[in-house]
Image: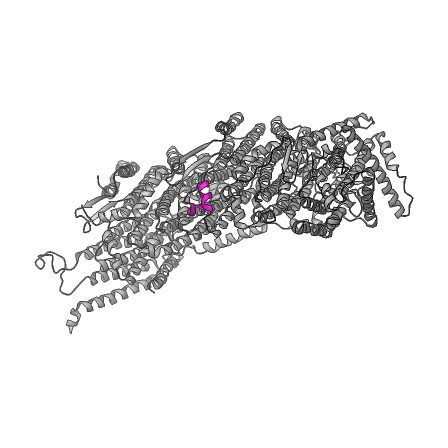
Amino acid sequence: MSLGYYFLLPVIFSFLTPYFKKIGLLRASSILLNLLLFLQTLVYTMMSLPQISLFSIKPPLGIAFILDGYSLLFLLIFTFSGLMVSLYMPWFFKANPRRDEARFYLFFNMLIAGSIGMILSCDIFNLYIFFEITGICSYTLSAYNKDKLGLESGIKYLIIGSIASIFIVFAIMLIYLQIGTVNLGLIAQRFHQIDPKISVLIVLMLFIGFGTKAELFPMNFWAPDIYQGSISPVNGLFSSVVAKAYLFVFFHLFYLFGLNSKYMLFVMVIGAITFLVSEFTALNQTNVKRLFAYSTLGQLGILFMAFSTNSIDTVSGALFHLTSHSISKLLIFLTLGILIHKLKSMKIDILGGFKSTFLTIVLVISFLSVLGIPPFSGFIGKILILKGFALSHNYAAVAFILLVSIVEAIYFFRIIAMMLDKSRAKVIVNVGVMNYAILAVLAALIVLFGIYPSLLLHYTDLAANALLHPTNYLTYALGVGL
Amino acid sequence: MIFQIILLIMLAYVVGFIYFGLYRNITARIQSRYGPSVYQSFYDSIKLFSKKNTVNFGWMFYLGPVIMATGAILTLVLIPIFSDSDFLRSVTSQGNLFVLLYLMVLGPLGNALAVGTGGNPFGVMGVVRGLTRLIGLELPFYIAVVGLIIAANSSDIVHIIDLQKTTGLNIINHPLLFIGAMISMVGFFGESPFDIPGAPQEVYSGPRTEFSGKFLALLMSQGSLFAFAKLVLIVDLFLGGADSLEMLILKTFAIFVTIIFIGVVYGRYKVEQAVDFLMKLPTLIAVLGLARVVWFG
Amino acid sequence: MNSIFLLLNLLPILFLYQFGGALHVELNFTSSFTLSLIQTPLGTFFAYLSMISFLLVTIAQKSKKFSFSYYMLQLLLSLAMFMIVLAGDFITFFIGWEIMTWSSYFIISKSKNIDTKSLQKYILFSLASAFSLIAGMVIAYSFAHSFDFSVISSAFRDMPFNIQITLIVLFSLSFFTKAGVIGLHYWVVDTYSKAPDLFSSILSAVMSKMGIYGLFLIYGHIVGYQELKMMFGTILNGTNFGYTLAWIGVATSIIATFKAITQDEVKKLLAYSSIAQLGYIITVIGFGTAYGVAGAMYHTLIHTIIKLLLFINVAAIVAQTGKSKFSELGGLIYRTPVSFVMLLIGIIGLAGMPPLGGFASKFMMYNAAIDTKFALILIGMLFSGAASFLYCYKLVYGIYLGHPTSKNLETTKEVPISYLIPQIILALLLVLTGAFPGAFIKVINPVLVEFSLSTIPYSGLGVMNSAVGSFNGLFIISAFVVFFVLILLLITRIKSKAKNNLNRFDISYCGEVPAQDTSLHFGFGFGADLHKIKFANAILKRSSSSFYESLATQTKKTSELFSRMYYGNIHNTMLIILLFFSALFFIGVN
Amino acid sequence: MLEFFNDTQTIHFIIIVGSMSLFFIGFYGIATQKNLVKILVSFDIMESALFLFFIGLHYKVGLVAPILDKHLKTFTNMVDPVPQAMILTTIVIGLAVLALGLSFGIEYYKLTGRNDISKMNELRD
C-alpha cells in the first residue's frame, strides 16, 4: 500500500468516467472510490506515523508523499466528507436530473485527489500543482450549474484563484532562487538564511496566496458569492474540504518555516477580524447559502486565531473545532440541498418552512455544535481553544471570541426559532433513506465527539504535536535514513 | 395564662373604645361641636353585634373580619403590656418586633380579602389606597424600629424595654426616631393628613363600605383593640413601657392625644401626596436618627 | 406517559437518597478534564429542592396533554440541574448549565404564546450568562491549571488582585443574569410570561435558583466568605463586598416590586415578583455571616415553594378560563374555592406574613441585616416588603375577588385535581416551614460548616434563632389558629339574619344601581396611583429595554455596514487583495 | 560592444527589468481593465513575466541547456534543469486555467451578452 494511491486512484477513476458512464455505474464508482480512500485512511490510522511513499528518487531530490499526524487528521476529514458527499449525490441527481453527471464526478474525484495531494506532498512545487488541480476542479464545480449564477461564481473563483496562484508561483520562485530547493524539509532548514527583506516578501506572498484561498479577511469578499452560485454538495465540499485544505497548507508552512514567533500576532489579528466581520455580516443575510458561507468564514477566523498560538493544547483544540465544524457544515449544506430542492427557494425562510422532525433535530444539533454548546462536539473544541488562550494569558482573545459568539448565536437561534415556529406555513419534507442515514451518521458523530471526546482528541493531539514539532516530518522530508 | 389573655382583651377593648370616644369628643370640641358621648362607640359596637346584616357575600366575606380580629388579638398578646411583671411574659417571649411588624399587616389583609369578595369598587379603591399609602407610611416607622433594634442589638421588645431602664428612655435617646415613628402612627390611626383609604365623601367609607351588623361590630372592636396595641407598642419602644395600669393608661393616653392633635390640624392628603410627603421629611428625620444609631451609637 | 415520567423524575431523588450524602463519581472526560459529581450539603439541598419541584410539576402536568418530546426535554432539564448542583468541577457544571439552557429553550419554544423576539431574548441572555461563566472558568483555569472547584478555590488566594476581581465579576454577572438582577432581567419577564404555563413554575422556582446556587458556590465555596472579607475589607459588621452586593439586591427587589404592581398580565406580575424575591436573596447572600447564608437559603426554599404554588395555581386558572390578564379575570372565588385558598396561602407566604413560612425566611434575612448593622439595606428590604403587599393583593383580588368580567367566568368549574394535589402539598409545606422553622436549621448548619462559618444554635423544631432575637413559629401558628377558631365560633354564635346569595350587583354604589355592563372589577385601578408618586414614577417610567433595544439596533447597523463590503464586485475584490499585499509589503519591509 | 551583453550581471539586469515591466503591464491590465478576456490576458502576461524572470535568472553565461546531446555529455556546465521543468509544468497549468476561464467567459457571454467583470453582481443577498 502506498500513499500514491490517494492520487492515483482518483485519477484513474476520473479517466474512466466516460467508461463508467457508459456502463451506468458512474455514481457507484464514485462511492467505491471514496470508500476505498476512506478505508485506506482507516488503515493508516492503525500504522505508525509518519509514513512516506517515494516516487523513484528519495527526497530531498525526489518527489514523495509524507503522512504525519497532522495530515492524517485532515485525511480522515477529507475522505470521510468525500464519502458522505458521494453517498449523497445519487439522491441529488435523482432530484435534479442532469445530463452531465460525468462532469461532476470527474472534477469531484479530482478535487478530493487535489486536496489530499496538497496535504501529503512534501515539496512546495508539487504542493502548488495540487493547489492548482484543486483550484481548477473547484472553479469547474462552482460553475457546475451552467446558468448565470453558476458561471458568474466560476469566473469569480477563477479570477481570484489566478491571483492567488501568481502570488504563490512568485513565492516559490523566490524561494528557489534564494535556497535552490523546493523540498519542504530543506526550505524549513534554510529559511532563516534568506535575506530578511526577501523573506518578508516570500512570507507575504504565501500569506496572500493561501490566505485568499483560505478565505481570510480582507481577501474573502468573493467567498460568499461562490457558495451562493454553486450547488449544495459542492458548498459542503468547499466548506469542509477545500477551505480546510488551504488552511492546512497555510499552517503547515507557517510552522515548518518557523514563522510562528514573528507573525503570530499578525495572523491572530487577521483571524479575529475575519471572525468579527463575518459574523456581523451573517446577521444581515437573507440567502441561506450566503448565511452559512459567512458562518464558515467566521469559524475559519476562530481557527486562524487558535492555530497561530503555537501551543499544543490550543492547536489541538483548534483541530478538534475544525473537525467538528467540518462535520457540522457538511451536515448543514447537505440538508440545505434537500430543502432548496423541496422548497424551490434559497431564501432563509425555507428553514422555517419545512416540516420534518428529523431534519429539525439534526440541524439543531449541528447549529448548537457550531456555537460550541455542550454536549456537542463544538463545545470541546471551543473550550480547548479558550482554555489555551487563557493559559497564555491572552484574555482579550477569550473575551473577543465569546462576545462575537453571541452575535453568532443571534442568527443561529433566529433560524432555530424559525424552525420551531408553528405559525409558519410548513411543507412536509420526506428525507430519503440514504439521506436519512448520511445525516444521522453526521449528527451522531457530532454527539459522539461531544460526549466521548477522547476518541477524536487522540488524533488532534497527535496532529497538534506533529504540526508544532515537525522533527519527524523533517527527517522524512529530508530523506534521512531511507 | 388564658385568664390573663381574656383580661388583656377586655382591658384593651374597653380602653380602646373609650379612647375612640374621647377622640370623637376632642375632635368635636376643637371643631366647636359637642360631639357624642364618650361611650357612644362602645354602645354602638354592642348594638351592632345584635343587628342584622344587610348583605352577605359568602364565606370569605365572613372570614375576612375574623382574620382581621385574629390579627389584632395576636398582635395584642405578643406585645408586652407591663414592663416589670410576668404578665403574659411567656407568651410575648415567643415573638419579637419583626413578628409584630408583619402581624400588624395581617389584619388589614383579611379585611382587604373580605372587601374584595364584597365586590364594591369603592371598597377595593379604599384598600388599594390604603396599601399604596402603606408604602410611604411604613417607611419612617420601619426606620425607627430598625434604629431601636440596632441600638439595643435585639429585636426582643422586653429587652428594649429593660435597656431603657439603664440608658434612659428612647424618646430622649433617639428623638428623631421617635418623631419618625409618631408621624407614621398618625397614619396608622387613620388620622389626617393620612386618612385617604377610608375617606368619606370620596369612596364612601372605603374598605368598610359593605360591612354591616356583626361584621361592622367586629371590625370596630378589632379597631379599638388594635389601636390599643399600637399605643402600647409605642409606649414600650420609646417610653420604657409601663409597670402599672395607671402608668400604662397615662402614657398611652399621652401618645394618643398627641396623635389626635396632629390629626385634627391637618387636611387630607391625596395618596400620592401622602406618600411623597412621607418619603421626604419624616423619612429624612428618621434616617438621620438611624444614622446616629448606626455610626455613633 | 405522565406516570412514566413521574417515575423517571423520582429516580434522581432515590439515587441521591441511596448515596446518602457520600456521592462521589469521577469520569475521565478528556486527558485534561475530569468530570466529577460530588455531593456537598449545599448541593444536596438544591438537588432535593429542584428534583422535588420537578416531581410536583409533573404531577400537575397530568391534567393536560404534553408531547413526549416535552417530557423528554423536561427530564433532560432536571438531569442537567442535577448535574449542576452536584458538579465538582466547572466543566461538569458548565455542561449541565448549557444543557439546562437549551433544553429549557426548546420547552419554552413549545408554548402557544411565544414569539421569536422573546425566544431570542431568552437564549441570548442565557448564552451571555454562559459565556461569562466560561470566561471566568478559563481564566481561573489559567491560574489553577484545573477546573476542579477545590483546586481553584485553593489557588484563588494566590491570584493577582485584578484577576480575583475579574473572576468574581464574571461569575456574578453570569449568575445574576440567571437570577434576573435588575438591568439583566430584560429576558425574565417575557420568558416567564410566555413560556408554557406550567413550565413558568419551573423557570421561576427552580431555574432561577441555579443562579443562586452559583452565587453560593462562588462566594461560599470557591472564593470563600473569609477571603471576601480579606479582599475587600469590612464596613460596619459586614464586608464591603457584601454591602455592594446588598445594594444591588435591594435595588432589584424595590424596582421589581414596583414594576410588578403595575402589570396587567398575571404571569408578568409573578415574574417581577420572582425578580424581587431573588433580589432579597442576593441582598443577604454576600453578607458573609452565618445568618446571611441561612436567610438566603431559607428564602430560596420558601420562594421555590411559593412560586411553584402560585404558578401552578395560575396555570390551572389560565387553563380553565383561557384568560391570563387581571382585567379579564375576577370573581372566581366561589367557582374555584380550593384554588382560591391555595393562592391565598401562597400570597400570605409571598407577603412574608406570619404564621406561614414566608415570615420565617424574611425574619432570618432581616436579622442577618441587623447582625451586620446594614440598617439602610434592612430598611430597603422592609420597604419593598411593604410595597409587595400591593401586588400580593392584586394577585388574589384580580383573579378571585371582585366581579367576573365575562360571562364564562361565572360558569367556570374547579380546576382538575391533578393541579390541586401539588398545590395542596406545597401549601402544607408552607405551613410546616412556618410552624417548624427550627427544623431547617439542621439543614443549614452543615452548609455553614462547609463555608467555615459559625453554626446557628438549635433549640426546638418550632424556634427560629437568630443573632438578635427568636420567635416560635409553632406557638404563633397555634395561637393564630386558636384565636381564629374562637372568634369564628363567637361570631357564628351571634345569630343575625342575613340575606344570603344576593345578586352581586346589590352593592352600595353611590345611590345608583350598577348595570350588567358597569365595570365593577377594579382590575386597572391597581398601580394607577403609583404613577403619581414621584419615587414610584421614577422607577416605573425607566426601563432597561431601551438600552437593549439600542444595542440591537447598533448591532444591526454594524451588520449592515459590514455587509456593504460584500457587494460582489470581483474587480474591486481583486484590487483590494493587491492593495492589501502592497500595504503589508511596505509595512513588512520597513 | 556586444561583449557588454555577454556578462551574466547585465543579462540578469535586463531580464529583471524586462520581466518586471512585463509584470507591471499585466498588473496594470488587471487594475484597469474590466473585460474578462483582457483580464485573463493580463494574468497570462503576468505569468509569462514570472516565467521569464525565473528562467532568466538561472541562466549564466557559458552554460548550456540541460539537454543531453553532442554538446552535453556529462552533467556539467549546464543550466539548472529544475526551474525549466517547473516552468514547463506551470505553463501547462496556466494554459489550462486560461482555457477554462475563456470557456466560462464564452458561456457567460452567450447567456448574458456581457463580459464586464465589474458588472457581474447577480450573486448577492
Q: Residue at x 42, y 39 (%)?
A: A376
- Quarter of the image for the C terminus of chain C: give it: bottom left
Q: Residue at x 88, y 48 (%)?
A: B30
Query: Which residue is more in the foreground, D64 or A314?
Result: A314
Residue D92 in the image, given as x and y percentages of width and height: 23, 53
Quarter of the image holding residue B160?
Answer: top right
Query: Which residue is more in the foreground, B146 or D101?
Result: B146
Residue C407 visible in the displayed image: yes
Residue placed farthest to the bottom in the image? D1
Rendered position, C15 above or below B122:
above
Residue B204 in the image, given as x and y percentages of width and height: 81, 41
Q: Which residues are magenta?
A: C140-158
Q: Is residue B164 magenta?
A: no
Q: Is C536 left, or right, of D29 in this rendering?
A: right
Residue C562 in the image, given as x and y percentages of width and height: 46, 55
Residue placed farthest to the front in the image? B166
Rendered position, C73 above or below B190:
above
Image label count: 0
Quarter of the image holding residue C301?
Answer: top right
Determine the main secondary structure of the stretch shown in magenta: helix
Q: Is C6 left, or right, of B21 in this rendering?
A: left
Q: Residue at x 48, y 35 (%)?
A: C86
Q: Is residue C141 magenta?
A: yes
